[in-house]
Amino acid sequence: MNYCRDLKKIVKGKVAFNEPLSRHTTFRIGGPAKAWVEPADVEDLKNILKLISKNKIPFFVIGEGSNLLVRDKGFNGIALKLNSSFFNDVKINKGYILAGSGVKIAKLIDFARKKSLSGCEFLSGIPGSVGGALVMNAGARPNSIFNNDYKSIGELVKEARVMDAGGRIKILKRSQLKFGYRSSNLSKYIVLDAKLKLKPGKRVEIERNVSDFLRYKKDTQDSNWRNAGCVFKNPSIATQDNFSARSISAGYLIDSSGLKRYRVGGAVISGKHANFILNEKNAKAKDVINLIRFVQKKIKDKFNINLELELKIV
């Protein structure tokens, strides 16, 4: 299937072929994408999706490449990145922050700080983009073994503008959006931008909050190593009354199983945060996948708990 020539003809933005995806993920792992495309604007994206639909081309949207593991053989399709200036705008719109899908979380937080708007500081240290954060409902958990409560970006969303696989644009109001633990109903769309509702605050307090969250991340996570963030979702377990459930830290379960620093090839479980896998010695994707399977089996055998992936594998 030779669609590469057609891409060159119709795309106004950037197009590259056999682009190593290891350059675009925080894990720094993975083979090449057959095509790498950065649409210039919405019309460009729409034309690309028409080509994808017509030729039944596999594709996925990549944000900042966090929470993502690309297989060693790469991806035999199109990797789409909304990286142009069109998708990277952030501004005030009728009392809300309007942020493009490609806006980095750090940029969003800094913009809110400068406008003395509070409420998104808990996202500090998350190396993602607004679009990716919305799809997975990124957030932060409290510092405890059992954590039913956590803050997530979904709580801030007033509405989201999205495009479906057919190139049709929709505006999803708050009542149409469904956010769960590390999930949303946005995964079937391409997020274009979103309106976020924050509250007025004092800049000095906002800056203090950001510093506190960043300090906590630095103290508890291996931020200097190549990794993809938390690998597993925190599982829910039944309480004694059998009528409710609470979430237990996946990192606590892995640590309790004595698996910190356990290694498969170049991939190793963090000695600081057991729900992190580090690319310590030029790990291959197969090393990470084999380590994941090993951890899942150990936790199942010891606790009878199935650990689900938070990490996306393509």
Image (cartoon, rainbow, N blue to C red):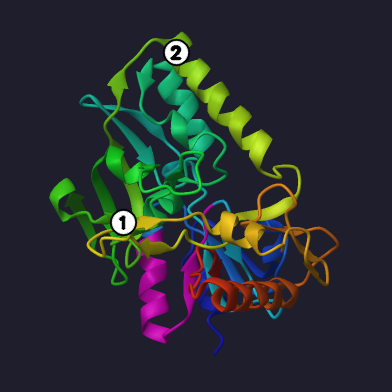
Q: Where residue 262 is drawn, which disc sits there? A: none
Name which residue type carries label 2.
Answer: Glu
Residue at (66, 49) in percent of width and height: 273
Q: Say above or below: 47 vs 180.
A: below
| Distance Cα–Cα, label 2 vs label 1 | 29 Å
Q: Quadrant of residue 268?
A: bottom right
Q: Quadrant of residue 246?
A: bottom left
Residue 26 visible in the snapshot: no
Residue 119 visible in the snapshot: yes
User: Which one is in front, 204 or 163?
Assistant: 204
User: Which one is in front, 111 or 67?
Assistant: 67
Residues in magenta, as a range? 45-63
User: Which one is in front, 30 or 199?
Assistant: 199
Residue at (34, 14) in percent of width and height: 201
Considering every residue shown, the one lying at the far front of the view is 240
The C terminus: image quadrant: bottom right
Where does the image place residue 288, in percent across and percent down from the top left? 70, 71
Q: Which residue is mark 1?
A: 180
The secondary element bearing badge 2 is classed as helix
Q: Where residue 205 is drawn, which disc sits there? A: 2
Task: Answer left or right for 68 relative to 113.
Answer: right
Where does the image place residue 37, in percent across and percent down from the top left? 54, 63
Residue 46 painted magenta: yes
User: Which one is in front, 104 or 279?
Assistant: 279
Task: Answer left or right for 184 relative to 258.
Answer: left
Where does the image place residue 217, in percent across and percent down from the top left? 61, 36
Residue 303 painted magenta: no
How many discs mark residues in the rendered view? 2
The reply to whether callout 2 and callout 1 are in contact (CB within 8 Å) is no
Where does the image place residue 66, in percent across and percent down from the top left? 58, 54
The secondary element bearing badge 1 is classed as strand
